[in-house]
Amino acid sequence: MRYATAFLLSIAAFAEIKITWRFEGGNLGRVERVDAAHYRAHLAGESDQDRRNRQANWYYFQVEAPANQSLVIDLVSLPGEYNYKPNRGAVTADTPPVISFDNKTWNHVEAFEYDAAEPRMTLRITPKTGRFWIAHVPPYTSVHLAALRKFAGSQIVETTAGYSVEKRRIPLWTIGNGPKTVWLFFRQHSWETGSSWVGEGLVRHLISAEGVPLRQAITWKIFPLPDPDGVSRGGVRFNKFGYDLNRNWDVNGVEKMPEITAQRAAIKAWLASGHTIDLLFSLHNTETAEYLEGPPANGGEGKYTALAERFFALLETQTSFAPTRKLFFSDSSTTAGMNGRMNVIQGLYKDFGIPGFLMEQRVSAQPKYGRKPLIADRLRFGRELADTIAATLRK
Ligand SMILES: [Zn+2]
């Protein structure tokens, strides 16, 4: 009996833990083994074309480990820079990872410690099964998008706006045929999967029976996947060459930024064919802030004040949007005096005078949900968003 016990113990001690991320959207820098049940996982992070603005808040990896044995994983290499200002990183005690045992259902890791000094996020996990997945927020890949596309069938008219640096297709969806036009951008930044889940909720609502009046009143133009390369490799916010997909809307660089060039051309063609764009909206995620940024310079002389205030008031009172600051109107650029620093609403306002809105939704705990948002919350907001945009334009 003694021998049998020793034998079992030695098997447990030698059970290899395997951490991998070679699948769509998967990403991690490297992994160090501290001991058999303790690993340090370095986030890869990404920097821009000038090796600035490092952001390390996308990770998505699979762990194979013995079930029912405790395991410690430290997430490190967190510090970065945002709009040229250094920070301790986007991964903090406010933003612990999500974990899944089936790669579909995601919940937040409960047992973690955040050490702001290093900084380091330490996860203590005792898996119920021999395989699980960890990510910053619930992943959304091209597989999810293809399933949605298939589900929608002929309700979505799909065209190709252009191709990414790595020659992946940038789809443009049209739903409905109403006299007004709403143009939507989801997931300009590849780490912001929450934006994609909202987009999915919105599309499912539009194509449902309840969506009939929305489709009759409005033509919905949607960019559901503006950065297919980033989504594929598990990127953060830059394209293959390091260009931020929500800056650089003031420069034309077909070779280095085919994604932005393709999107701008689609909008230009729509306007050139005699159509209008009554409202443009781009949805993003941040760690802890939630807000709505209105049309740049308010369209001059308060041209869009009424529209923006109506939209904000409806969002605040009728939906789960929980702003951390009041409505404000965008500046003409994110970084005064620098080229390549206009975001999508700033650039398209400069070129075409389109009333654009940019929303950020947090991934940390949100008062209207009473917890950190999960997939169901994002899908719900998608429905609410479609209804709110329609109500805003009804007047
Ligand atoms: Zn973003």
Image: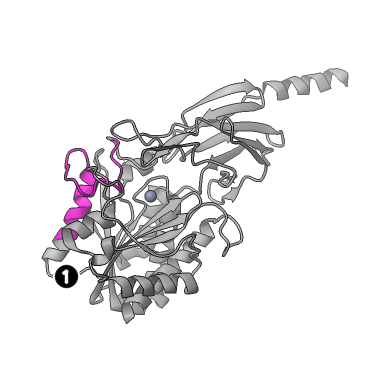
Q: From this viewpoint, is residue 355 visible?
A: no
At 28% from the left edge and 33% from the top edge, which residue is drawn? 49
Task: Give the percent coordinates (x, y) of residue 110.
Answer: 66, 46
At 83% from the left edge and 22% from the top edge, which residue is drawn? 5
Say whether residue 14 is magenta: no
Q: Is residue 206 left or right of residue 322?
A: left
At 67% from the left edge and 21% from the top edge, which residue is drawn? 14
As rendered, which of 29 and 47 lies closer to the eye?
47
Label 1 crowd bin: few (<14), some (14–19), many (20+), radius 10 Å: some
As rendered, which of 70 and 43 lies closer to the eye?
43
Q: From this viewpoint, is residue 112 visible?
A: yes
Type of amino acid at the residue the image marks with label 1:
His
Farthest bottom residue in view: 395
Q: Secondary structure at mark 1?
A: loop
Examine the image and state in which quarter residue 66 appears: top right
Magenta-colored span: 242-268
Task: Give the percent coordinates (x, y) of residue 288.
Answer: 51, 51
Task: Give the percent coordinates (x, y) of residue 171.
Answer: 27, 54
Q: Give the colour scheme shown.
A: one colour
Q: Is residue 391 left or right of residue 126?
A: left
Where, quadrant-wise, is the N terminus in this rendering?
top right
Say whether residue 252 is magenta: yes
Q: Is residue 271 left or right of residue 200?
A: left
Task: Give the percent coordinates (x, y) of residue 13.
Answer: 71, 22
Residue pointed to by mark 1: 275
